[in-house]
Image: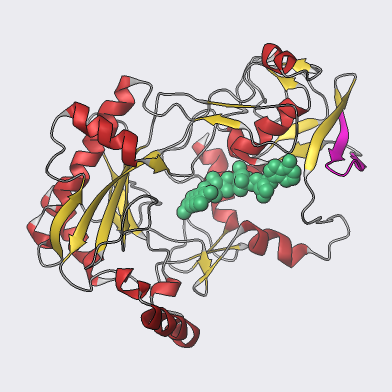
Amino acid sequence: GYEDVLPYFRKSEDNDTFEGRYHGKGGPMGVSKPAAPLPICEAYFKAAQALGIPFNSDVTGAVQEGAAYYQLTQKNARRASTAMAFLHPNRSRPNLTVKLRANVRRIIVEAGRAMGVEMMDGTRIAAEQEVILSAGAIGSPRLLQLSGIGPADHLQDLGIEVALDQPQVGSNLQDHLDLYCIAEVSGPHTYDRFAKPHLSVLAGLQYLITRKGPVASSLFETGGFWYADPDARSPDLQFHLGLGTGIEAGVAAMPEGGVTLNSCYLRPRSRGTVRLASSDPAMAPLIDPNYCADPYDREMSIRGLKLTQEILGQDALSGFIKAERLPGPDVRTDDEYFDFICQHSKTSHHCAGTCAMGPDGTAVVTPRLRFNGINGLRVADASIMPRVVSSNTNAPTIMIGEKAADM
Ligand SMILES: Cc1cc2nc3c(=O)[nH]c(=O)nc-3n(C[C@H](O)[C@H](O)[C@H](O)COP(=O)(O)OP(=O)(O)OC[C@H]3O[C@@H](n4cnc5c(N)ncnc54)[C@H](O)[C@@H]3O)c2cc1C
């Protein structure tokens, strides 16, 4: 439960702002307040407040709802990746070997036990105790299926010898679908102006000297949480204010520059799949996110998109915004909104659920992350989430890693 895993969230953090029940200091992962917010962020908070969405100084604290600055996995205005935070400081440990550009071809399973892994070059690494699979919500089910662990009919179709028929491997794929509302700004109010080469150079210099400015920005460090379903037990919408446009593929940058407000519905009912295109381990897998297959997801997503339009249309932002460009005035009916979503939405990169944990034997892994039906194998990554969390997935996945290490 939540109270069981909360200490692991705290443990990983070296938070530059908060400490207490929900946050930690002194952990390996730098967590920081944004280094480079712009005045348009404050205007966005006022616009949200005008619609009854309060400002929240910490949406990862006691209360999730509200408009907010996000904290970032940054340390000293530099991205704090898990490799930098957890691996680099421990490179000299005798029980750690890091192999770069080393792709695993398959997990070796003999008589129902994971014995080790075979690399793409054919070398084998034997497991003394267990194989811990941590290849992500796409990579883990892909590797399992390449190893003969997955839906038997699918594996047989591809000529892969079945080690274990487990239809749930690669099923239950969930993601948050990002929808975006884009407005043209009336002046240099966002970071779009730094697209010009001479200003890019200046931005680079500013970062080197002050550790501030656009280079220190994630561009999406403002946002918050609110409700598509007013009766939801906790927020089911998330926003990201993008301090520019042209960030999303397929959207042309505007002459004056722009601002983007993304929304995503956080508790999708639709489920997708990760399957293999072939038995060739060099081939990319077939990923079908199946977004909005459930009509409820469509309805909630459209509500979120309409709310972003309302926020950007508030008086508080009128000094910054010239006009909404996307979806724009031509999108009116729910069918038109859905067409717009089909054309312009994108992944939030929050894939989860494809090796789901559960209490009974039909789940892919047990609550101790042991693989049901294969001995000596555990999975520890975003794939074990039974349902995708109602937020970003990086910190929860790090929590899963911390908890797995304790197991
Ligand atoms: C572009 C992008 C932006 C994101 N932004 C945010 C954000 O702002 N906030 C947030 O909370 N989350 C964000 N996420 C999501 C977050 O990064 C993921 O939820 C998290 O990294 C999942 O961790 P994981 O360990 O499950 O998988 P991963 O981080 O994907 O790790 C899996 C690892 O396994 C390796 N691997 C896979 N297959 C093999 C193989 N066969 N052999 C060897 N190695 C293999 C991969 O190379 C990778 O290093 C973002 C994701 C992306 C892609």
Query: Quadrant of the rendered structure where residue 343 is?
Result: top left
306 displayed left or right of 348: left
Asked whether 117 falls inside the magenta stretch, the response is: yes
Q: Position of residue 194 (x, y in %)?
A: 35, 75
Query: Quadrant of the rendered structure where residue 234 is?
Result: top left
The quadrant the C terminus occupies is top right
Q: Main secondary structure of the magenta part?
A: strand
Q: Position of residue 337 (x, y in %)?
A: 22, 33
Please, is residue 53 above or below residue 280 in the view?
A: below
Q: Residue at x 47, y 88 (%)?
A: 209
Q: Position of residue 80 (x, y in %)?
A: 57, 64
Q: Residue at x 74, y 33 (%)?
A: 378
Query: Quadrant of the rendered structure where residue 55 is?
Result: bottom left
Q: Residue at x 29, y 27 (%)?
A: 298
Residue furthest out toward the top: 153
* Residue 370 appearing in the image: no
Please, is residue 242 above or below residue 208 in the view?
A: above
Total marks in image? 0
Toward the viewer: 396 or 150?
150
Please, is residue 346 above or below residue 115 in the view?
A: below
63 displayed left or right of 21: left
Q: How is the image coloured?
A: secondary structure
292 displayed left or right of 124: left
Please, is residue 169 above or below residue 405 in the view?
A: above
387 displayed left or right of 112: left
Q: Position of residue 49 (x, y in %)?
A: 15, 53
**Magenta stretch bounds:** 114-126
* Residue 173 appearing in the image: yes
